[in-house]
Amino acid sequence: MPAKSTIGGTVGGSTPVSDNPFAAQDTEIEDATVSGISPYLSSSPLGTGTDTVGVGGMSNALPGVLGSSGSGYGVEGVSEHGDGLYGSSVYGNGVHGAGKNAGLFDGEVTVNGNEAISGSLTAGSAKFSGVTTTSLAASGALTAGSLETSGSLSAGSLKASGALTAGSLETSGALTAGSVTTSGKVTAYDVVLTGGGDIAEEFAQLGEESEPGTVMVIGDEGGLSKCTLEYDRRVAGVVSSAANLKPAIVLKGAERALRKGVSLAMVGRVYCKADASYGPIRVGDLLTTSPTGGHAMAAMDPARAFGSVLGKALANLERGTGLIPILIALQ
């Protein structure tokens, strides 16, 4: 049967426990030892244990263990193999820190549950399954299942398997996230986008809705409509997302001039409707607008092609119409 220690009267030959308003009288704690003198305060009890609990505290309403210090640590936990300090609560906070700095972590911080922080969090490195905070700074790696902050977020490197939301974001290393939302500035040393094939911008659309892959031209009102003329110098680009190739970046303006909008591929690789009835299309051919609504064709006439080229073909189309990959290059 586990050994038990009874705390009551005088602890370690120092201050009577009855003088402490937070101490529970005659409380039994399994596998606990309270004896000795703390190296910080000469009249404080020191709890030690070998393969057992050093200090245990339980309370229905008040703190189970209370530590107070004028200049040192109120409560200090040290362990070679286990947890230096452990807190558990059914309905409240397992560990609650209050002060000018509610928490200071010199090493890695790991949080297995969702964590809500009303102030700022600063750590050398941190791992969370979910975190919400006003601001967050980590000089090392920051890893989270999901992360949301209304203020700034700064880290040496940042990885979120879920959503990342920040007022502003800065990282000197890698940024990896399922999705990123920021109302402010994003600053990064290196950005790698693993999904998508183009950079698109949202424009107002005139007339009927155009499906992905449609070649668009600029209308008189500034909106876009599908092309209907050959060698049209009003060509603007191709509607993104055809053949399930999504844009890597979508630029959205603050204004919504018209009720309908369309994401137009401006740079990169996109699938485009093409018509080889006016001549076969081969890899490397310059493409321009065609009379077939919303389709591109090979630019056979160099004199007319200037100013109406929308890109280069990345696949062959010998006859008829089809959807081919192209490299957007307006010229």
Image (cartoon, rainbow, N blue to C red):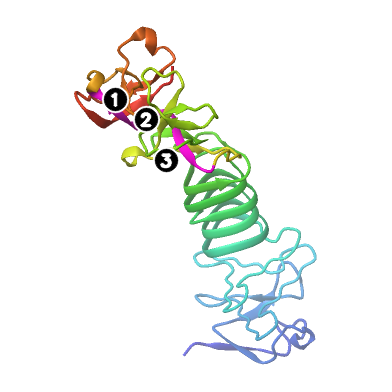
Question: Nearer the N terminus, badge 2 or badge 3?
Answer: 3
Question: Where does label 3 land, which residue?
Answer: 209
Mark 1 against mark 3, which lies toward the viewer?
A: 3
Quadrant of residue 276 in the image?
top left
Q: Quadrant of the C terminus?
A: top left
Q: Is residue 267 above or below residue 307?
A: below
SS for dot 2: strand
Image coordinates for residue 301, horizontal then vertical, percent: 33, 10
Q: Is residue 162 above or below residue 228?
A: below
As drawn, is 200 to the left or to the right of 302?
right
Image coordinates for residue 70, horizontal then vertical, percent: 80, 66
- Residue 269's mark? 2
Which residues fall within the magenta stretch? Answer: 259-276
- Contact between labelled residues 1 and 2, with CB atoms less than 8 Å apart: yes
Question: Of all residues shown, which one is farthest toward the left?
Answer: 318
Hey, what amino acid is under mark 1? Leu
Quadrant of residue 277 in the image?
top left
Real-space CA distance between mark 2 and mark 3, rounded to the nearest whole angstrom:
22 Å
- Residue 322's mark? none
Question: Of all residues shown, which one is farthest toward the bottom?
Answer: 26
- Residue 314's mark? 1
As drawn, is 321 to the left or to the right of 147?
left
Quick one: label 1, few (<14), some, or many (20+) residues within 10 Å? some
Q: In front: 123, or 145?
A: 145
SS for dot 1: loop
Image coordinates for residue 227, horizontal then vertical, percent: 39, 27
Real-space CA distance between mark 2 and mark 1, rounded to the nearest whole angstrom:
9 Å
SS for dot 3: loop
**Residue 139 visible:** yes
